[in-house]
Amino acid sequence: GESVGLHLPTLSVQEGDNSIINCAYSNSASDYFIWYKQESGKGPQFIIDIRSNMDKRQGQRVTVLLNKTVKHLSLQIAATQPGDSAVYFCAEKNSFQKLVFGTGTRLLVSP
Amino acid sequence: EPEVTQTPSHQVTQMGQEVILRCVPISNHLYFYWYRQILGQKVEFLVSFYNNEISEKSEIFDDQFSVERPDGSNFTLKIRSTKLEDSAMYFCASSPGVGETQYFGPGTRLLVL
C-alpha cells in the first residue's frame, strides 16, 4: 500500500542551528514531492517541492533533497528561527491529483 | 498575494444534521480539492474537482458527501447526515493546473456532537 512516513515526531533545535526533517515514502511511482508547514490552527502552507527527475532543490533558507534509491526525502532549514516552529509535512503525488501526506514532524525552535 | 479562503472557521452541529462548508479558491485556478485532518492525524485527501466534475475521490468520500461549484467563485463540500467521526478540520485547496502546487485554505473546524 502507499504510505508516506516521517522518522521523528518532534525535532528540537536552537535558534540559528540548521534543521533537517526527514521523510520516507514507499511508492516508487511517485513523481512529485512537496513540503508543507502547518502552524497551529492554520492550513498547510507550501514551502518547497521537487520532481522525481531532480535530487536537490533550493529555496530561500530551505533545501529539499530526494534520494530515489532509498525512497527518502529531507527538508533542510538553514539558520532556523523561532518563526519556523510548526509541524512539517511531506506529501507525495502518485496519482492524477491526490496528495498523500505523512504524519508530520513538529519542529520546536528555542531562542 | 491571492489565497484560498474558507467559511465558516468553526462549525458545531448535531449528529444527523447537514452541513455545508464553503471555499473560495484562488481565482485563476482550475482544480479544487477537499482534504480533512482529524485531530492529531495526517491530512487526508477527500476529493478533487475539475470542470464541474469530480475527477478523483477517496474511499472516505462516500454517499454522504457531495461537492459543488454553485457559481464562478465558490466551491462547497456538503455532508448530508453528519456523524461523530466527521469531526475534523476540513481544508480546501486549489491549483492552477493538474500536477501543480496545491494551495490550502485556513480550514473549517467541524465539531459534531
Image (cartoon, rainbow, N blue to C red):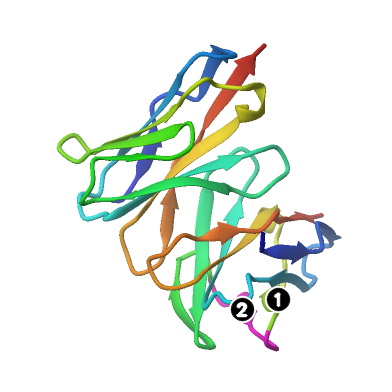
Relative side of A58 to A81, left or right = left
Marks 1 and 2: in contact by CB < 8 Å? yes
Horizontal and vertical percent position of residue B16: 77, 69
Q: For residue B79: magenta? A: no
Q: Are marks 2 and 1 on the same chain?
A: yes
Q: Is residue B49 above or below residue A57?
A: below
- Locate residue B86: give its quadrant: bottom right
Q: Where the C terminus of chain A falls, by quadrant? A: top right
Q: Secondary structure at mark 1?
A: loop
Residue identifier under label 1: B80
Give, as a single range, the part of the protein colored magenta: B62-72
Q: Nearer the viewer, residue B51 or B54?
A: B51
* Camera-nearest label, 2 or 1: 2
Horizontal and vertical percent position of residue A49: 40, 48
Count of numbered circles in the view: 2
Q: Label 2 sits on what residue type?
A: Ser
Tell me the number on the disc at residue B66: 2
- Locate residue B113: give its quadrant: bottom right
Q: Label 1 sits on what residue type?
A: Arg
Q: For residue B71: magenta? A: yes
Q: CA distance from mark 2 to mark 1?
A: 8 Å
Q: Chain of mark 2?
A: B
Horizontal and vertical percent position of residue A16: 55, 14
Which badge, 2 or 1, comes first in the chain's sequence?
2
Q: Is residue A103 at least partly visible in the picture?
A: no
Residue at figure coordinates x 69%, y 81% from the top left = B73
Q: Chain of mark 1?
A: B
Q: Is residue A68 above or below residue A14?
A: below
Q: Nearer the viewer, residue A75 or B11?
A: A75
Relative side of B94 to A92, left or right = right
Q: Secondary structure at mark 2?
A: strand
Residue at figure coordinates x 70%, y 61% from the top left = B83
